[in-house]
Amino acid sequence: MRHPTDETLTPPDSNGVSDTGGEPVRSCILTRDRDARDHLVRLALGPDDMIWPDVRAKAPGRGAWIGVTRAELEQAIAKKRLRGALARAFKGATFTIPDDLPDRIEAALHRNAMDRLGLESKSGALLSGSEKIATAARSGQLAALYHAADASIDGNRKLDQAWRIGMDREGSDLRGLVLPMPRPILSLALGRENVVHIGLTDRAAAKRVSDALDRWLHFIGPDLPLAPCEATSRGSSAPEKFGHDTAPDTGKDEYEEFE
């Protein structure tokens, strides 16, 4: 799920112990693949017996974790594999899978990523503006670099090169990630005007942003075009349910993938 420029993140080992600072590890109920829980998506059983995305893992009660792409999830729904996996996770509980569950997950992940960018912008760890980013990049202070989908190829190339110089990585393929969203969406998320490029100078902030963006990008799938001036935002406006942003996760689960 991680983009090529993120060198601060590493996956958990085969024993389920994460070497990313002790992050909890969970298993996807569909593939059984294991990863840090912050790289997966939690599905929660709501009080209305509906399955809802709980991307911040704060809803009370039991949940199940998935780490598949949207296309894989849609296939699992069509073949009833998701229903079977959830039935095992919730052990006989009554539940309904909404027809638009993939849309809800995509919208929630997109919103979570935009919220994270907005928070880091307010904290002062995020730079916008080519000159500021280039200065930080050349001085080796840049921890992450992102470009809007409609940024010019030449502008991207110049900032990528400045980053390689600052990181003493000239001649490498180190470069910023082109996000599948145009500058109006980035500008709205950050509360700034005409945001074309984003730089992060704090490694902890860069990791938080990377985790949020990577989950969204992984879910919408690898086939989404990411080339400048070609990609568009796929964000939706479907609402999250029953207080996922604030409710404490008080559920105690027997198995790690059902938390």
Image: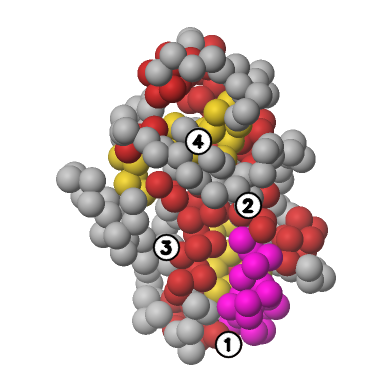
Tell which tag, 3 or 1, sits nearer the viewer: 3
Tell which tag, 3 or 2, sits nearer the viewer: 2
Q: Which mark is residue 6?
A: 3
Query: Is 46 above or below relative to 197?
Result: above
Tell which tag, 4 or 3, sits nearer the viewer: 4
Report the side of 21 relative to 157 (left or right): left
User: What is the secondary structure assignment of the residue under circle 2?
Assistant: loop
The quarter of the picture where residue 212 lies is: bottom right
Query: Is 40 above or below relative to 71?
Result: below
The quarter of the picture where residue 108 lies is: top right
Tell which tag, 2 or 1, sits nearer the viewer: 2
Q: CA distance from mark 2 to mark 4?
A: 14 Å
Q: CA distance from mark 4 to mark 1?
A: 48 Å
Report the side of 213 relative to 9 (left or right): right
User: What is the secondary structure assignment of the residue under circle 1?
Assistant: helix
Residue 122 lies within the magenta run? yes
Which span of residues is magenta-colored?
Answer: 116-134
Residue neighbourhood size for the residue with mark 1, other residues' Cα within 10 Å, grouped as few (<14), some (14–19), many (≥20): some
Task: Kindly indicate whether the residue at mark 1 contacts the one at mark 2 (C-beta within 8 angstroms).
Answer: no
Task: Kindly indicate whether the residue at mark 1 contacts the one at mark 3 (C-beta within 8 angstroms).
Answer: no
The quarter of the picture where residue 203 lies is: bottom left
Q: Which mark is residue 135?
A: 1
Residue at left offset 51%, top offset 25% = 73
Q: CA distance from mark 3 to mark 1?
A: 20 Å
Residue at left offset 32%, top offset 46% = 25
Q: CA distance from mark 2 to mark 1?
A: 38 Å
Compare marks 2 and 4 and give the one earlier in the sequence.
4
